[in-house]
Image: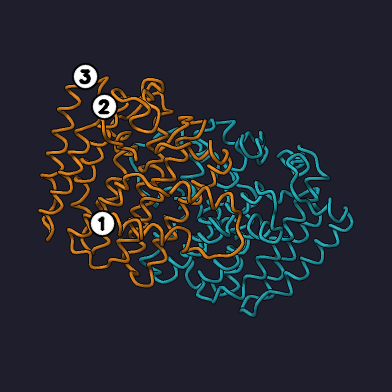
Chain colours: A cyan, B orange
Amino acid sequence: MLNVRIEAAIQKNICTTIGAGPAPDGLRNAINYTVFPGGARIRPTILMSVALACGDESPGLSDAAASAIEFIHCASLVHDDLPCFDDSALRRGKPTVHRAFGETTAVLVGDSLIVNAFATLAAQAAHAPKRAPELITYLAKYTGFPHGICAGQAWEDESVIDLASYHLSKTGALFIAATQMGALAAGHDPEPWQELGARIGQAFQVADDLMDVLSNDQDIGKPVGQDAKNNRPNAVTEYGVEGAKKLLNDVLGGAIASIPSCPGEAQLAKMVQMQSSRLMSVHQTHPHA
Amino acid sequence: MLNVRIEAAIQKNICTTIGAGPAPDGLRNAINYTVFPGGARIRPTILMSVALACGDESPGLSDAAASAIEFIHCASLVHDDLPCFDDSALRRGKPTVHRAFGETTAVLVGDSLIVNAFATLAAQAAHAPKRAPELITYLAKYTGFPHGICAGQAWEDESVIDLASYHLSKTGALFIAATQMGALAAGHDPEPWQELGARIGQAFQVADDLMDVLSNDQDIGKPVGQDAKNNRPNAVTEYGVEGAKKLLNDVLGGAIASIPSCPGEAQLAKMVQMQSSRLMSVHQTHPHA
């Protein structure tokens, strides 16, 4: 099963790429607390599904890429939960990292996981001298400045927001990274895979907006109403509940239509359809998990 | 001149490796504020000096490595200055990043610079398919968990500190990265260069300890007395002022003696000697710059 493979890959790549020996236990425990147990592992699942659809000719590289993108995602959650950002108390149904381990440790967990993501990919260079650095370049592009999730978060501090850039970098970036890195890990051209990632990202954004308005804290394991509280753009505010649900449906249809020709196209369409069903039943899902 | 070359390299590699387009100006300005004007650029200077001593056969790769290590160093300063760590108001004689741009931006500056360091090295992979990923592996090792500066910082939260690991990871790590990456960029085996980096790191630690006790804020452009305030180990507390000065002298002598055989050995010894003179006149220097 895909989820078993992904968990095994994450377990293998967590910090093992960068050696062993005496190390501060607090940070070690906090890194483990952050990464395990995981949420839905949505980004690595998408990455791996694309890699499989493209033939998955370098399974070790796909595993590393799936792990790396999850490390970046986990890092972003820990930093976004910090008191200076969302000041969240709950994440995946348990105390956030800074609540459980303190704020300094939470900053270092995020930093360490970012580093470990790139170390995980670099460790594949002996077997994949061309693709491993390319994967690093893609992951960096969608993580840092000016187009990655760091930039996406920073848009929220601007007085004038470029909404397209904001959504593309805040939520879209790691989904685009997932589809493009999946293709790249399997030796396919990543460019045709941009649209699928962007549309999945947009779907998750709209689903998240719906959930932020319609759910309660217990349902989703984290605080709701954050967009209104932090004065952030939200599709429900813009289009109403029914309008946002229609938009979500349209975007998911477009995602499936955008899948490039590849050996496992039909199987991949089924995976997107499955994720879509999860998203459409917004009250039972955890889009940020 | 070496410092002109280093500044040009840093300027070239700052965020240019990861594309252009609309981006949040606040984060862009804060990244520039963090990296320019620089301090003494000590780590890239050491890296470049070692690369030159080893023949500097891939100047573009040495430039990228020097830039990458400075990005990591700058990221660490911004995160270490945060309210939850040192809560510093001043750095390099001007307001710290979180004071000037806010705490959220400061977190994102650090994250973005870490990402950009790895992107800068990955961009060299087309020209240096073997060495670029190796440089990423070394930089990651000395930045993250369990042996990098993230681990070094985390030791300060432990009730029982492994002092050797603490010093090696907190201050030594990026100096070891500097010497080893300099050798690697020039195509030499990095392993014999570990000791030089470790000894230079120890010298800077002792000099920093002396300065923290003996200087005042105006002299060094950042607050002093932080070790006592934060109950951190300090060589002056342990050996007294004269004992710490003798230790510094011994360590620097050992550093010069440890330089591996290489074409530019004599020139490199002179550089270490020059840095040593700076360190020995602790009241006029900025070891963390």
The answer to whether residue A154 is left or right of residue A257 is left
Q: Is the residue A208 above or below the residue B107 in the image?
A: below
Q: Nearer the viewer, mark 2 or mark 1?
A: 1
Residue B170 in the image, given as x and y percentages of width and height: 34, 37
Residue B223 in the image, given as x and y percentages of width and height: 40, 28
| Mark 1 or 3, nearer chain start | 1
Label 2 to label 1, Cα distance in Å? 28 Å
Label 3 to label 2, Cα distance in Å? 9 Å
Q: Which mark is residue B240?
A: 3
Using a 10 Å C-alpha cutoff, classify the residue at mark 3 as few (fewer than 14 neighbours), some (14 to 19) or many (20 or more).
Answer: few
Q: Amino acid at mark 1?
A: Leu
Can you identify the residue that label 1 sits on?
B2
Q: Secondary structure at mark 1?
A: helix
Q: Nearer the viewer, mark 3 or mark 2?
A: 2
Q: Given the image, what chain letter belongs to the residue carrying mark 2?
A: B
Q: Nearer the viewer, mark 1 or mark 3?
A: 1
Q: Secondary structure at mark 2?
A: helix
Q: Nearer the viewer, residue A45 or B281?
A: B281
Using a 10 Å C-alpha cutoff, classify the residue at mark 2 as few (fewer than 14 neighbours), some (14 to 19) or many (20 or more).
Answer: many
User: What residue lies at 48% left-to-right and 59% top-to-bottom?
Assistant: B15
Can you identify the residue that label 2 sits on?
B210
The quarter of the image holding the C terminus of chain B is top left
Label 1 to label 3, Cα distance in Å? 36 Å
User: Decide: marks 2, 1 in contact (CB < 8 A)?
Assistant: no
Q: Secondary structure at mark 3?
A: helix
Residue B189 in the image, given as x and y percentages of width and height: 21, 59
Q: Is residue A1 visible?
A: no
